[in-house]
Image (cartoon, rainbow, N blue to C red):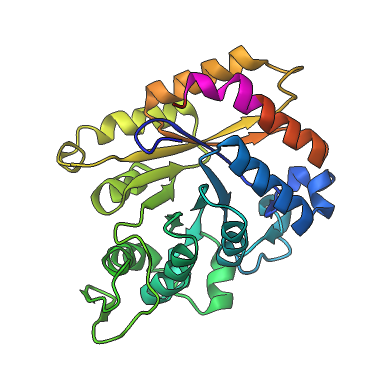
């Protein structure tokens, strides 16, 4: 679980219910099952758990995006209360839904309660209906997002944050409690070179989605030519998903999964969100145990 090498976490089940899972065991699962998974992930030494953010999904969109999204602050605060070591990754929180100081306060409080175990993954958002529902600006969200990133970064761990930007300006306000981590990791979600550039310039990592490994590797290679990449003086994380579609002992097998991990690491990945196939809670716990025992020792110190 070293912060310096490869990090392997879990894409939390239950807290998000995607359409292809609608008939699975997760549909009826709740806090008791989530507790067992959280404790098992901690005991097995996984690096992180995830939770995404949507306030409301239009009914006509739910067939594609799913309708269940647990609130990340509430979910992670519960998980933090029953664990000591595992980290919590928002994958992702939609930054333009919130004022930067609301992000600093809500997620900073969660970071305080977890003793500094939050990784804030953020995205620009794309669901116009939800922006309209929340009274958030949609058309200019990209520019606001870029400014908000800087404002949030300047506010972590600061009881009296100050920021002056294009859209957000503040000082002389007390934010207490604030994050335990003054350098709380900020990972940028997206599927474009622009999102990767934002992460390099103003964040600490990149969490792409809906890209092939070849597309991801191509973007990373391009990013390495940027001055911002060459001038970075600290670790930059690249977080990829690792979906396993069949039982580890019956499907592609341990060696094939290892080869996929190796290819992703060669492309630039430093962190993984593992999502194993499962037909029940017991099967899920068995699969993450098998992964821990048969695969993780080859990649994690």
Point out the image quarter for the C terminus. Answer: top left
Tell me: 247 left or right of 220: right
Tell me: 73 left or right of 166: right
Quarter of the figure with residue 43: top right
Q: Is residue 289 magenta?
A: no
Q: Residue at x 72, y 52 (%)?
A: 34
Range shown magenta: 291-299
Any part of residue 57 in sight: yes
Q: Who is closer to the viewer here, 108 or 40?
A: 40
Q: Position of residue 62 (x, y in %)?
A: 71, 57
Q: Position of residue 111 (x, y in %)?
A: 45, 63
* Secondary structure character of the magenta stretch overall: helix
Q: Residue at x 38, y 66 (%)?
A: 179
Q: Position of residue 152 (x, y in %)?
A: 33, 67
Q: Residue at x 71, y 59 (%)?
A: 67
Q: Position of residue 238 (x, y in %)?
A: 39, 38
Q: Who is closer to the viewer here, 262 or 184?
A: 184
Question: Count the marks: how many?
Answer: 0
């Amino acid at each position: 679980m070293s912060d310096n090498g490869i990090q392997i976490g879990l894409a939390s089940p239950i807290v998000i219910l995607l359409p292809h899972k609608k008939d699975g065991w997760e549909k009826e699962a709740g806090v008791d099952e989530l507790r067992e998974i959280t404790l098992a992930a901690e005991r097995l030494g996984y690096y992180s758990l995830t939770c995404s953010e949507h306030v409301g999904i239009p009914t006509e969109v739910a067939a594609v995006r799913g309708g269940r999204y647990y609130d990340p602050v509430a979910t992670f605060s519960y998980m933090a209360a029953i664990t000591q070591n595992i980290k919590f990754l928002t994958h992702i929180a939609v930054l333009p839904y919130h004022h930067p100081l609301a992000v600093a306060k809500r997620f900073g409080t969660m970071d305080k309660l977890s003793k500094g175990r939050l990784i804030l993954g953020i995205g620009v958002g794309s669901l116009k209906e939800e922006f309209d529902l929340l009274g958030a600006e949609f058309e200019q969200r990209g520019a606001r997002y870029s400014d908000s990133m800087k404002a949030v970064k300047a506010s972590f761990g600061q009881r009296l944050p100050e920021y002056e930007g294009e859209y957000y300006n503040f000082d002389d306000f007390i934010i207490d409690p604030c994050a335990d981590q003054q350098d709380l990791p900020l990972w940028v979600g997206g599927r474009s070179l622009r999102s990767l550039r934002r992460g390099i310039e103003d964040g600490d990592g990149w969490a792409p989605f809906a890209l092939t490994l070849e597309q991801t590797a191509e973007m990373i290679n391009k990013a390495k030519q940027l001055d911002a990449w060459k001038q970075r003086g600290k670790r930059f994380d690249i977080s990829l998903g690792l979906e396993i579609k069949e039982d580890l002992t019956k499907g592609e097998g341990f060696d094939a999964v290892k080869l996929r991990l190796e290819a992703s690491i060669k492309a630039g990945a430093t962190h993984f969100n593992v999502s194993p196939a499962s037909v029940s809670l017991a099967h899920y716990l068995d699969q993450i145990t098998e992964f821990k025992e048969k695969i993780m020792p080859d990649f994690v110190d």
